[in-house]
Amino acid sequence: MSTHILVIPFHGHGHLFPSIELCKRLSSSYKITLIVPSSLSSSLPDHHPLFQISTLTPPSSQPESDPPNNHHHDPRRQDLAQPFTDLLTTLFNGSDPPKCAIIDVMVHWAHQPCKKFNIPTMSFYTSSACTASIEFAMGKLSPENLTPGEPLLLPGLPDHICVTQTDLTHLTPPHHPNSGPPKPGFGPPFRPGPPISTGPGNRPAWVSHLEISIALMINACPDLERPFVEYLSKEIDKPVFSMGPLLPEQFSRSDGSVVHDRDLRSKRDQTNYSEDEINQWLDSKPRGSVIFVSFGSEVGPTFDELAELAIALDECNRPFIWVMQSDSSRPGPHGPFSSPSNMEVVSNGFVERVKGRGLIIRGWAPQLLILSHRSTGGFVSHGGWNSTLEAILRGVPLLMWPICRDQHYNAKLIVDHLKVGLMIKVDAHGNQIEQLKKGDILIGIEKLIANEDIRKQAVSLASPFEHGLSSSYMATLDALNDFLSQIVE
């Protein structure tokens, strides 16, 4: 009988997608059950051929949504610990009780029920090893360690990975004055997720959870992030398993073929263009000419910056695809939560003027298809780790426009370490400037397109993945199998 392992992702597709890929990879050796909150169940099929899916529904007395002033429905406000305990009770009364649980580092409620049933837990970090290393290293710092305006080297990390006082603020998201009193343990509505910082010294919460976990699993690939993987392995007194890049294996083969999202991921939202229409549009453009702009589904630039971005794309005279999410912008100085929709911000004939040269996708977009198409020449991205990995594996240069959290540290990896992208605009100290203007965006796009060194480096970095998963991943999988065989005996 196969060892039964539970995988418990944090809410949000940025965490769900790598968890699904992890389940698929582990399913060849283990019985896997993916456990998701009911808020994520619509993104999954009722059954998966490689693993089981169990859904946790909050008690009927628990409100199904946040108060109206909250921008995002937040499953962390639901009491899922009791439904999870009930599920474990059922599993342990069956013939194949779980032997281990892999828990997203942001899922705090799952550890205690596992402890009750004596189930060993592994912490699962879904972002980059670079981000985890910076957070870990900065957890040893206090604000007095940083001098305003002066970069500080982090001992044990590459010399080009510096932090400033601004970086320290990324550990704990700011509170927006219009959102009411802050609620302990929760981020502001436009930046989902609990604050990373806990206690003195800005120690990340996931480091605290490592104390009750038997290992750390991370969505990293040593071929891309070796010094950071080595740093974590040295600093953390637990085994560290680099399971990345956790992307569909068909996509990671950068053999020049176009990948269709419909073959790999279920479509979640409505959209104004089909995959075939987008593919045909890309076919009509010269190789490497299209600028792809997308900020993910949960965060984005301010409304004022969106308007500046529209002007920049209008004036740049380059073909582009802009994915426009209806609710992913964050409030700026003149953009409270009641501001108009994104499309209203870029009105005044913009869509008509760029027709043919620009493709504006409202809602869901086939990102795997777009990044794997030969016509895509650059990616203006918020720097979410899934999107960043997808661009790396297809050799697409990145123009980084980080909004919050790990996106800032992923940008350091892309710009300073891997050298396959640029920051859209920084000040003299390397910090991203606030409230980007049209000129900043235009200059950033032109610099990216004109930089042959970055383009060659992006192609070179993607080449080891031409035939799928790297040898380093297979070595990690062997080590994980050996480790699991010891703990379940």
Image (tube, rainbow, N blue to C red):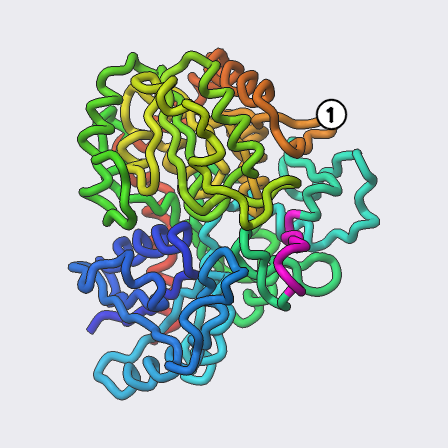
| Secondary structure mostly taken by the magenta-highlighted segment of the chain | loop
The percent coordinates of residue 376 (x first, y second) are 34, 22
Residue at x 18% of width, y 63% of height: 47
Residue 157 is drawn in which quadrant?
top right
Q: Is residue 217 left or right of residue 167?
A: left
Residue at x 66% of width, y 52% of height: 174
Relative to 365, say whether 90 is above or below.
Answer: below
Q: Is residue 311 left or right of residue 484?
A: right
Q: In the image, is residue 174 part of the stretch drawn in magenta?
A: yes
Give the number of marks: 1
**Viewer-side residue, 77 vs 376:** 77
**Viewer-side residue, 309 vs 381:** 309
The percent coordinates of residue 289 (x first, y second) are 36, 15
Residue 86 visible somewhere in the drawing: yes
Q: Which residues are magenta?
A: 170-182
Q: Which residue is mark 1?
A: 428
Helix, strand or loop at label 1? It is loop
Relative to 64, say whether 144 is above or below.
Answer: above
The percent coordinates of residue 21 (x first, y second) are 30, 52
Q: Residue furthest front?
A: 348
Residue at x 66% of width, y 34% of height: 434
The percent coordinates of residue 238 (x first, y second) are 53, 62
Q: Residues within 10 Å of mark 1 (few under 14, many from 20)?
A: few
